[in-house]
Amino acid sequence: MNKFPLESFAFLNGQPNVTATLRQYPEDFIVQEDLGYEPEGDGEHHYLYIRKIGENTDWVARQLANFCQVSPRDVAYAGKKDRHAMTQQWFSVHLPKTRRTINWALFGGDSIRVLRSEKGRRKIKLGNLKGNRFDITLRNVSNMETLLERVEFLKNGVPNYFGEQRFGQEFGNLFYGAAMLAGEHEERARHKRGLYISAIRSYLFNCTLSDRINQKRWSLPELGDVLIEDYTQRCQIFEQDNSEQLARFNALDLHLSAPMWGQGELYSNSAVAEHEQAVADRYPDLSKGLEQLGLRQERRGMRLVPRDLEVVVRGEGECTLGFSLPSGSFATSILRELCVWDSAQTLYE
């Protein structure tokens, strides 16, 4: 029996009965990264805005290191992007002693192209980006009218679940992570420790979020809730009958949050904290294991709001959905509330 039932996470508006095909072609899944800042225009770091098709981010970084004859440590990016997609993202290459002009047009090929090059004073940091713009084409939509009705639901936000990519193929990251905490598979865990830890924390978060939806406690904050600001991620305790907080919550500027498990006291209190602790107690091997690793309590918003949402119907059974999401969120969490999809390409690199 599966002790980690990933398929059972609650839907906000009921499980969709619309079916569609996703990623029939790489161009059906377009991602454009937004760092949230511009390179300064001078400095020792070369910033490259690269379009890649059908390649993973680490592979492109290695090709850049080879092209520039530098260590892979001198190449950086803010986040990994899907392989089976057309994606555009920034890379930085540290070239402090280069006096020659580099012809970036010589880098790449059919699947990689440098769209823009700038200079900057700092290395791009992993995770330091504002978000991503997605343009996703769905084909073979079984009921376009129903799908468009469900698109309207998206405007008020969806559960901010970690997508199945976080857990690995056949949820391997989660299962190996649990084994790692039990002292098993030590050799494998040594190389993928970060992935396994992330999978475990993500699973506990998803469980807490799913419980709130099942308990009909999603639509309004409660005494003891920790609210988190959209994009800035700043937290504040909800004060009952605080009209300003309620107004910001209804305006989709503040969201309920749930713990990313670790050491220390929960930020929440009252019945909210009791519920969050109960979820952790349901999986003591996972929660205690995270605490023993020295991770600290953090928070993540439970509501994900797609910004600049638009949908274009392109023909019989085909449409393109466009939206922007903050860093750390998953486009598949949006799609999950829309339809059940089959994919011509795997979600995993």
Image (cartoon, rainbow, N blue to C red):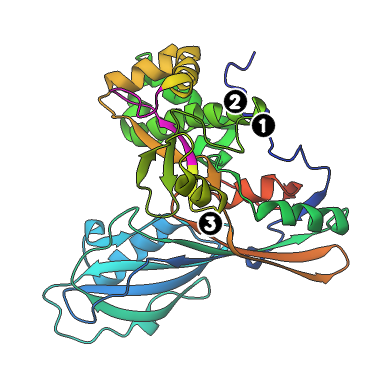
Residue type (three-letter) at the residue carrying disc 3:
Arg
Percent position of residue 114, x then y: 41, 78
Image height of 159 relative to 313, above or below: above
Labels 3 & 2 near each other (Cβ < 8 A): no
Front-lying residue, 341 or 53:
341
Question: Can you see residue 349?
Answer: no
Q: Circle 2 is placed at which residue position?
A: 211
Q: Which secondary structure lies at badge 1?
A: loop
Identify the residue at image location x=53%, y=56%.
83
Q: In this figure, which residue is indicated by the disc labeled 3?
A: 83
Q: Earlier in the sequence, mark 3 or mark 2?
A: 3
In the rendered image, residue 218 lying in the magenta stretch gets the answer no
Q: Earlier in the sequence, mark 3 or mark 1?
A: 1
Q: Quadrant of residue 84?
A: bottom right
Residue 10 numbered mark, or none: 1
Viewer-side label of 3, 2: 2
Above or below 333: residue 251 = below
How far separated are the C-alphas under marks 3 and 2?
32 Å
Please tell me which residue is depicted at 48% across the width and 57% down the height of the picture: 81
Q: Magenta part of the protein: which range?
A: 256-269
Please, what is the three-letter code of the amino acid marked with disc 1? Ala
- Whether residues under marks 2 and 1 lie with C-beta atoms below 8 angstroms apart, the answer is yes
> How far is the residue under mark 2 from the one under mark 1?
8 Å
